[in-house]
Amino acid sequence: MYWFPLLRGRPVGVLVGRGSALALVQRSLVDARDGHGGLLVVSGEAGIGKSRLVEAAEEVARDLGLDVGHGRAVDDPGCPPLWPWTRLARDRPALAAALAEAPAGSEPGTSARFRWGVGAADALLADARAAGLLVVLEDLHWADRTSLLLLRHLVPELPRSRLVVLATYRDAAGRPVEELLPGLLGSGTTHLRLTGLTPVDVGRWLAADPSSAEGPGLAEALHARTGGNPLLLRLLLDALAGSQAPTAVDLDRLLADRPDLRSLVAARVGELSPRARAVLRAAAVTAPVLAAPVLAAVTGQPEEAVERALAEAEEAGVLRRGTGADGREFAHALVRDAVHADLGAAERSALHHRSALALEASATPVPASSVAAHWDRTTAEGAVGCRARWWAAAARDALAGHAFD
Ligand SMILES: Nc1ncnc2c1ncn2[C@@H]1O[C@H](COP(=O)(O)OP(=O)(O)O)[C@@H](O)[C@H]1O
Ligand SMILES: [Mg+2]
């Protein structure tokens, strides 16, 4: 177990069960300081502890005298291409200047674009030359193609540099990361796949957390409920914080009283009506679009019935009021992931097919790339032609907006 009791004056939580992952990170950082950089990839489901491991890695890097830089991708269709790199370039003038040379509108594979990629990579490699540099690129499951292609320019140069790139992502079917990351995971890359903490780790966490005096059976019960996912553990521990030496029985009582926690932890929607379950299964495919008319078209149910189903899911804590255009969103990515994971391949393909048709016919305009992405994920008849047509439309939209991926 590793404690980082004081980090720049701010108390940081315990880190359990990641000893071997952190040892690998530490070795990569020492190697980089000695002139042999590389790519470290950390993957795993939402809440599994990717960002927490990154925090620990940054602390080790600073202790070793390395410089640290950050960029992250965000889940927002309005986000411009290259966002993670743009964020990273905020305090790196050479990189910012190189990125600004991006050849708008040029096709991948053109020499202008190649030169641009090399220029941006060189700027970052130069930044790493003096002290060594850890560059963190978080949440690449949301990254655009251009961002990932730029990473591809950089990776072959890393072993002869003092630069370590630490990238995190979670599996995201149909996103550019799924297509482009495997090509980066060659030799010289360390891939850490994070899984749930063990019951022993959970016990250690409880023992180390001064606010959670543990009653009988709690560690095992917590592990059984969460599969060792640290985010879920954190949520349950916070909710139990009022009880004195909580036990497995207190945990059961808490989950009985709190449907929001129950649905998160159970990650199932089994307690909802069959109609609400059907609507949620469709919503897991159409998200972030959760508009009743679209879901009505996808499920074949009347719009009022869909509205009632959405209200039921909201009451159960599976959906919540959101800031998005449709006013609702999944309570957490974990819930959507869980519903999506429960779909069989045939049902998923059929739902993507109906989603593509529903969005094509939608009264509210949606980006062509969203329609194209649904055509990508269905094996329905005619999908190949529709896919090509909608990606071409998406490319035209991107060019019109001076994007270039
Ligand atoms: N190994 C760990 N030990 C203790 N707490 C952890 C651990 N990993 C993650 N956490 C905590 O769990 C929560 C979710 O982790 P986070 O790193 O944000 O997940 P991710 O980035 O994979 O979605 C955070 O509050 C984090 O501090
Ligand atoms: Mg994270």
Image: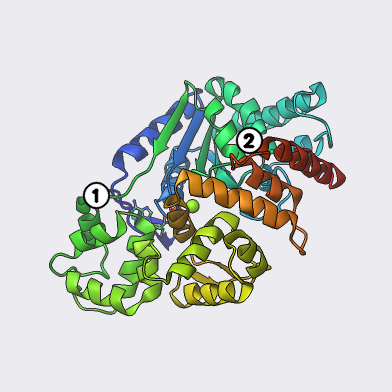
Question: Which kind of residue does numbered mark 1 sit on?
Answer: Thr
Point out residue 44 in the picture as x, y percentages from the top left corner.
Answer: 42, 45
| Residue 11 shown left or right of residue 384 in the figure | left
Of residues 43 and 374, the one drawn nearer to the viewer in this rendering: 374
Which numbered disc flags the more N-terminal residue, 2 or 1? 2
Q: Quadrant of residue 21?
A: top left
Q: Which amino acid does label 2 sit on?
A: Leu
What is the tally of numbered marks visible in this picture?
Answer: 2
Q: Mark 1 points at which residue?
A: 198
Taking the spot 48% from the left edge, 69% from the top edge, the residue there is 275
Residue 22, position as x, y percentages in the image: 36, 40
* Above or below: residue 212 compared with residue 13: below
Q: Is residue 258 left or right of residue 394?
A: left
Q: Nearer the viewer, residue 405 or 345?
A: 345
Q: Which residue is drawn at 77% across and 64% down?
A: 363
Residue labelled with disc 2: 148
**108, above or below 236, in the image:** above
Please name the residue shown 37% across and 33% down the image: 24
